[in-house]
Amino acid sequence: GGKKLWGGRFTGATDPLMDKFNESLPFDRCMWREDIKGSQAYARALAKAGVLTEDESSKIQEGLGEVAKEWESEKFEVKVGDEDIHTANERRLSEIIGKVGGKLHTGRSRNDQVATDTRLWLMQQVQAMRENLADLMRVAVDRAEREVDVLLPGYTHLQPAMTVRWGHWLLSHAAAWQRDDMRLRDLTPRVAMMPLGSGALAGNPFGVDRQALAKDLGFIGGVCPNSMDAVSDRDFVLETLFATATHLTHLSRWAEDLIIYSSGQFKFVQCSDAYATGSSLMPQKKNPDALELIRGKAGRLQGALAGMMAVMKGAPTTYNKDFQEAWQPMFDSVATTQDCTRIATGVLSTLKINPERMLSGLSADMLATDLAEYLVRKGLPFRETHHISGAAVKMAEDRGCQLSDLTPADLKTINDLFEDDVTDVWDFQRSAEMRDTEGGTSKRSVLQQAEKIKKYLADE
Ligand code: ARG
């Protein structure tokens, strides 16, 4: 390889395979902005500490600005020996401004530098992921409001259970997405803690003002309290990976619902052409590929979290090169999450629904609970009414008719508290409207849930 930053004590060359094995530039180059920004702030801090003259500091900051321009315009030339984004930028800085470039790294190590860059990068990405999540929630809320009158069969164990509103289903997922967003919000101050000024592990010997540096760089969580921990800690990556894997798990379950609802047997919904594909063989096919990809990618992201946990567990205190293995799962998880949330927003905003099919998926036996509740309102204990309604279900089954085909007279033979008004029970709309307690599926309640999410989005 070329001349190495750390080459002083070395006489032998690195195996070219080792050079490749060791490099992280292919992954961490996407943090060039953060690396430059961190270095410019560090140059300012060194000047304040009296290590650099104002002139040297300005030269370094301007030189770094030049390096940034090269990245921006895709003119940055990677050279042999550019192990990672930190060495690449420093090498180029010195080529541009000469010897004084070599003063930038005073008191700094790539150990505090890499953690600083990564945190700065993640702070941005977490914000971007939250914006994507907000867009998705808005689509769900908007549809829930507009389509609040549409009824949907609700399932447990994928067996027909009770009538719910389509909007209630939409907001059940929005509720999970809101927690995903809160998780990203809540981990932000821990991501936004500054390692810079920790050196390799023992701290900074030149008295840089870390508090001022943290302010300068926008680290709202303050400074990392212990230099050994600062270069050791990758929790902020782990919890971000947990948050992204959990969000994708939620998206995956949402996707799975829609895959089922769009299947030929259900036909409750249809994906728009923009998010489906056809078959190379069967002309009639329209496959929900976007949804299946989300479901599949969720699996990969769970693997990223598990992989990263395993990378960390055996590492002795402070920095170890194992940590470099964090970048692939981290960059992949963040980019994949951005894609999935945005694709989900596209799928949901263009999804066609078929309210008639949903309605025809409702069957009278899904009112058996309502029948039991009818008797509860006549004073019987629920446990008894459950049995009585069960007997009615059996009677209908024996006769090969619908539960709602049983007349008040039929039902009276099972229990004499049934009256003629029992026919009111055979009404899916009524069934939904009965569940009017906060969080339930009545129209009022669904609209109230939508209001709450809108308020949350407005406040955040
Ligand atoms: N490329 C390295 C990483 O991603 C940067 C830190 C290297 N530090 C070191 N002491 N070798 O982790």
Image (tube, rainbow, N blue to C red):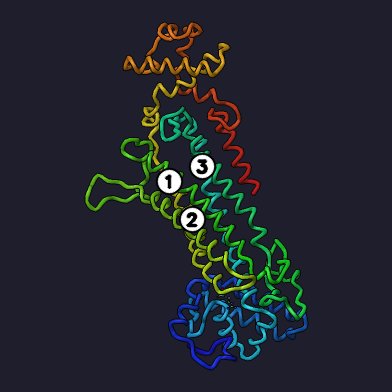
Label 1 close to label 3 by CB (< 8 Å): no
Q: Quadrant of ligand 1?
A: bottom right
Residue 31 picture quarter: bottom right
Mark in the foreground, 3 or 2: 2
Residue type (three-letter) at the residue carrying disc 1: Ala
The residue indicated by pointer 3 is 173
In the image, taking residue 278 as reference, residue 151 lies left or right, namely right
Q: Distance between the Cα atoms at labels 1 and 2? A: 16 Å
- Residue drawn at point x = 54 percent, y = 27 percent: 442
Q: Choose between 376 and 348: the one closer to the eye.
A: 376
Mark 3 or mark 2: name the one nearer the start of the chain.
3
Residue type (three-letter) at the residue carrying disc 3: His
Q: Distance between the Cα atoms at labels 1 and 3? A: 10 Å
The residue indicated by pointer 2 is 302
Residue type (three-letter) at the residue carrying disc 2: Gln
- Percent across and percent down for residue 25 are 50, 76
Rendered position, 265 above or below 295: above
Rendered position, 359 above or below 398: below
Q: Choose between 35 and 20: the one closer to the eye.
A: 20
Residue 123 visible, this angle: no
Q: Secondary structure at mark 1?
A: helix
Q: Secondary structure at mark 2?
A: helix
Q: Choose between 235 and 195: the one closer to the eye.
A: 235
Mark 1 or mark 3: name the one nearer the start of the chain.
3
Q: Distance between the Cα atoms at labels 3 and 2? A: 19 Å
- Percent across and percent down for residue 2 are 50, 89
Mark 1 or mark 2: name the one nearer the start of the chain.
1
**Residue 255: mark in rendering:** 1
